[in-house]
Amino acid sequence: MRSVRPSRGGAVQVEQVDWVDIPAGVVRRGTPADEVAAVARRYADTGVPMEWYLKEAPRAEIHVPAFRIARTPVTVGQWTRFAAATRRPAPQAPTDHPVIGVAWEAATAYCRWLGERLGGLAVRLPTEDEWERAARGDDDREFPWGDEYRTGLANLVDLGIGTTTPVGSFPEGAGPFGVLDMAGNADEWTSTRYAPYPGAPAGVPNTEGWAFDPHVTRGGAFRHDRDLARCARRHGAYEPDLEAIGVGFRLAAPAA
C-alpha cells in the first residue's frame, strides 16, 4: 500500500510498505519448561544464564488472527522522511540499512505518522505473539529458517561485520512466510510489555527492573550472538544507548 504526496520542491514522494500477509493460525509460542536446561547447555558458549531462557516457558499454543507485517525493518531512508517532517535528527547511515537507535515512543510515533499517509491505516508495532508467528510459522522451528543455526543466514556477531547491512541481504534466512531479517541486523521493538507467560516457572521475574524500557524486543542485532536469533528468545532493551545495541523496528497492520 502506498500514498503519494508532493514534496516541498514539487516532486512526488511515495510512502510504500512491502507487506506480507500472515494468515490466522496457531503459534507454538515459547519453549517447554522441561527443555529450558537443554537450551541453556546448547548455547552455553554465549554466557547466557539459564534464568534468561526460563522467560520463554512454558510452551503454549496461541491462536493469532490474520495480520500484515513488513517484509523488512524500517530503513534509514524511510525514517529520514519522518525525521524531516517532525524535526528530528536524521541518522547518518546508508538509506537501505535498518534505522537503529529508535526509542519505543519514537517508533510508535512513526507508525501513527505513516498510518495517516496511508489513508488512515492502523499501522503499529507487532505484538510479541504476532512477531513469533511470523518468525515460526506453523511449526516449532528454532530459527526463522529452520532448526539448525547456520552462519551466513543473518547479520549476527559471528559474521564480524560489526554494523548493520542493507535490509534483505540474507534471503536464505527468510522465515516461513517470506519475512526477512527476523534474526540479526536490528533488534526489533514489539508493542508488548514484558510479563511472565501464564504458568511460568518459579523464579521468572514479574518485571525486568534492569531493562531500559519495559517493552519486549525480538530478533537480535548485528552485535548479538546466535541465541538471540532464536524465534522464542524474548528480552528487553538492556542499555539506554539504543544505537549501540542496535534497536530498530518493523511495522504491522490489520489484515487486508
Image (cartoon, rainbow, N blue to C red):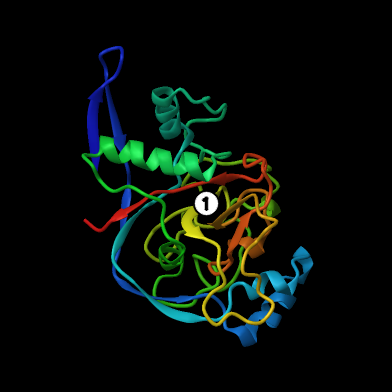
Q: Return the x and y of residue 39 as percentages of the image width and height.
A: 67, 77
Q: Is residue 48 shown above or below 99?
A: below
The residue positioned 48% from the left and 39% from the top of the image is 106
The quadrant the N terminus occupies is top left
**Quadrant of residue 164 within the rendered picture:** top right
Q: How many marks?
A: 1
Residue receiving disc 1: 188
Q: Nearer the viewer, residue 172 or 113?
A: 113
Q: Is residue 139 shown above or below 98?
A: below
Residue type at tag 1: Glu
Q: Is residue 158 left or right of residue 120?
A: right
**Quadrant of residue 210 within the rendered picture:** bottom right
Q: Nearer the viewer, residue 85 or 185?
A: 85
Q: Is residue 147 shown above or below 116?
A: below
Q: Is residue 172 left or right of residue 70?
A: right
The residue positioned 23% from the left and 34% from the top of the image is 3
**Quadrant of residue 240 within the rendered picture:** top right
Residue with the most extreme bottom position: 34
Q: Is residue 129 shown above or below 162?
A: below
The residue positioned 28% from the left and 65% from the top of the image is 66
The residue positioned 51% from the left and 52% from the top of the image is 189
